[in-house]
């Protein structure tokens, strides 16, 4: 991407992204993160800039179906990816199972981290369905069920400073379980 | 962040050709992009190597495995063959970072990630690794999580990778594409002690490109990875141990031990391994081996706990394997 005529360094690029199903062509500064393009360029402010260092998970989106920290992914390097943000999880007015579970379980307080939690939890269910182990899986050759210890470990890249973790774990457990969870959350 | 140009390499030769002057290869970016944001790294050009054709995990007939440098950490950790035959590698990968970061981070980038020493990451502070000759404030300052083995008066940084510790135990070799051809480097020869030039983490030259990692087959002795950190998940190691042991008729036939969080490199504990070979499979042997390795430790004011922690972890990991409590 060197300039052909002037010889000056080219620090912008045309990229293509599919965002929540829409194919977009976007001109970006090479320094822009995917998060900045989503929030500032496309007005999709669901994903949050919590720490901008990949430590809090508030910016979590799905890229080609995999959860990533949008703050650490340069937009120019995301060229060609299919991105799903929290705005794209629902089907119209029909919430996704993870969204329904968060709503039913009151799995938030201020809500700032919630978009990242929702995207991350959506991917956690998919990873578990593919049989991925985690750091708390006793034998990594096994494909474990999502018990509470597994959920806590797998969601550890998403911080909640309100401390809504108890209900977040319950919500993920409910979304992961084909059977309704019976106990009452107080 | 300083402006930079971006190029995407289609072949390793493309990448080498594009790598001039102030260039950095871009993997998943989980460390490099952050360091650029912090002003620690200021490349004028990034060459994206994530779309090179080094993205496969190939299990070999001899039981070994060849892992492409662009394979994502999560895919390597989840690979059925790796989980079956080299579980210690999956365990180490899963002990590192978060699900999001493992999805982005590549194998090559994991090997070449920089220390998380707070002084290195803070451009307002001196640091011999970041600004050679400026000094090391960590030695008198905040160093509770820094090195106790192989450090120098110039630098007490630790290498942060979990994966590399398991790869050290597995006698992995790193495939490197250089300007003058291909090379294969033992993982333990990739890394170096800081000495009087901590600016260099590895023995690679500028422009060298890691294309893959080979683990020789067949899979050997049972091994486990155990990591101690300041919270239950998503934190770097205070001390970690990858330990393997092969016990026959009550005697230790062979053992391999690598330590993380204690040195500028994944620390292969060969002195401990030497003590263990032929010794009775008892806790006393394990204690003696750990003590022999850690005789060389030179803890600072606030990180002496790492010496006893490392010894206890070695004994615990190998003891569990001997006792069948893996």
Image (spheres, rainbow, N blue to C red):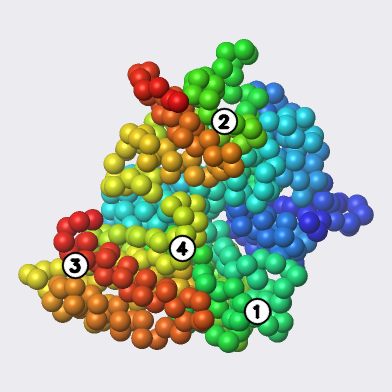
Residue visible at 81% across and 56% down in the picture: B3
Residue occupied by mark 3: B246
The reply, left or right, for residue A144 in relation to residue B150 is left
Marks 3 and 1: in contact by CB < 8 Å?
no
Of the two numbered discs 2 and 3 in the rendering, the one whose residue sits closer to the viewer: 2
Q: Are marks 1 and 3 on the same chain?
A: yes
> Is residue B91 positioned above or below A161 on the image?
below
Residue occupied by mark 2: A108
Q: CA distance from mark 2 to mark 1?
A: 41 Å
Q: Position of residue B177 (x, y in %)?
A: 55, 65
Quick one: label 1 or label 4, which is nearer the N terminus? 1
Marks 4 and 1: in contact by CB < 8 Å?
no
Quick one: label 1 or label 3, which is nearer the N terminus? 1
Q: Position of residue B243 (x, y in %)?
A: 30, 66
**In the rendered structure, the residue with mark 2 lies on which chain?**
A
Q: Are marks 2 and 1 on the same chain?
A: no
Of the two numbered discs 3 and 4 in the rendering, the one whose residue sits closer to the viewer: 4
Dot 3 alpha-carbon crowd within 10 angstroms: few under 14, some 14 to 19, many 20 or more: many
Q: Are marks 2 and 3 on the same chain?
A: no
Dot 2 alpha-carbon crowd within 10 angstroms: few under 14, some 14 to 19, many 20 or more: many
> Is residue B36 positioned above or below A112 on the image?
below
Residue occupied by mark 1: B137
Q: Position of residue A50 (x, y in %)?
A: 67, 44
Residue visible at 46% across and 35% down in the picture: A166
The reply, left or right, for residue B200 in relation to residue B266 is right
Residue occupied by mark 4: B237
The reply, left or right, for residue B221 in relation to residue A104 is left
In the drawing, what numbered circle is on residue B259? none
Residue visible at 30% across and 81% down in the picture: B291
Task: State whether residue A31 appears in this view.
Answer: yes
Q: Position of residue B194 (x, y in %)?
A: 55, 81
């Amino acid at each position: 991407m060197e300039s052909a005529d002037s010889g000056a360094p080219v620090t912008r690029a045309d990229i293509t992204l599919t965002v929540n199903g829409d194919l977009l062509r976007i001109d970006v500064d090479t320094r822009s993160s995917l998060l900045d393009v989503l929030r500032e360029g496309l007005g999709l402010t669901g994903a949050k800039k919590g720490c901008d260092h990949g430590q809090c998970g508030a910016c979590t989106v799905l890229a080609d179906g995999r959860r990533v920290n949008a703050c650490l992914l340069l937009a120019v390097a995301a060229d060609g990816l299919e991105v799903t943000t929290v705005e794209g999880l629902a089907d119209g007015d029909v919430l996704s199972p993870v969204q329904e579970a968060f709503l039913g379980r009151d799995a938030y307080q201020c809500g700032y981290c919630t978009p990242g939690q929702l995207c991350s939890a959506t991917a956690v269910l998919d990873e578990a369905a593919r049989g991925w182990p985690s750091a708390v899986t006793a034998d990594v050759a096994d494909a474990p069920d999502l018990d509470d210890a597994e959920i806590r470990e797998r969601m550890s890249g998403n911080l909640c400073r309100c401390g809504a973790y108890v209900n977040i774990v319950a919500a993920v457990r409910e979304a992961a379980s084909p059977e309704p969870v019976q106990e009452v959350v107080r | 962040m300083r402006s930079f140009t971006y190029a995407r390499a289609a072949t390793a030769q493309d990448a080498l050709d594009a790598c001039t002057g102030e260039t950095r290869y871009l993997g998943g970016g989980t460390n490099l992009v952050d360091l650029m944001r912090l002003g620690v790294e200021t490349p004028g050009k990034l060459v994206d190597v994530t779309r090179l054709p080094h993205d496969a995990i190939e299990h070999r007939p001899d039981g070994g495995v060849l892992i492409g440098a662009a394979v994502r950490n999560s895919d390597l950790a989840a690979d059925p063959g790796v989980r079956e035959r080299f579980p210690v590698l999956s365990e180490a990968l899963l002990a590192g970072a978060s699900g999001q970061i493992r999805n982005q981070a590549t194998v090559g980038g994991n090997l070449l990630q920089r220390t998380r020493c707070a002084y290195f990451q803070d451009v307002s502070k001196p640091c011999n690794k970041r600004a050679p000759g400026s000094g090391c404030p960590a030695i008198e300052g905040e160093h509770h999580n820094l090195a106790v083995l192989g450090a120098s008066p110039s630098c007490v940084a630790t290498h942060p990778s979990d994966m590399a510790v398991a790869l050290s135990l597995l006698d992995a070799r790193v495939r490197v594409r250089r300007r003058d051809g291909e090379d294969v480097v033992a993982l333990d020869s990739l890394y170096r002690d800081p000495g009087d030039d901590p600016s260099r983490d590895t023995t690679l030259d500028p422009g060298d490109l890691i294309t893959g990692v080979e683990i020789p087959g067949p899979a050997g002795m049972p091994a486990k990875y155990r990591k101690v950190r300041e919270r239950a998940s998503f934190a770097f190691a205070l001390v970690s141990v990858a330990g393997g042991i092969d016990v026959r008729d009550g005697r230790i036939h062979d053992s391999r031990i690598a330590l993380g969080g204690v040195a500028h490199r994944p620390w292969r504990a060969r002195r401990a391994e030497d003590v263990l070979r032929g010794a009775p499979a008892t806790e006393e042997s394990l204690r003696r081996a750990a003590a022999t390795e850690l005789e060389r430790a030179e803890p600072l004011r606030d990180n002496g706990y790492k010496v006893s922690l490392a010894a206890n972890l070695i004994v615990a990991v190998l003891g569990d394997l001997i006792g069948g409590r893996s």
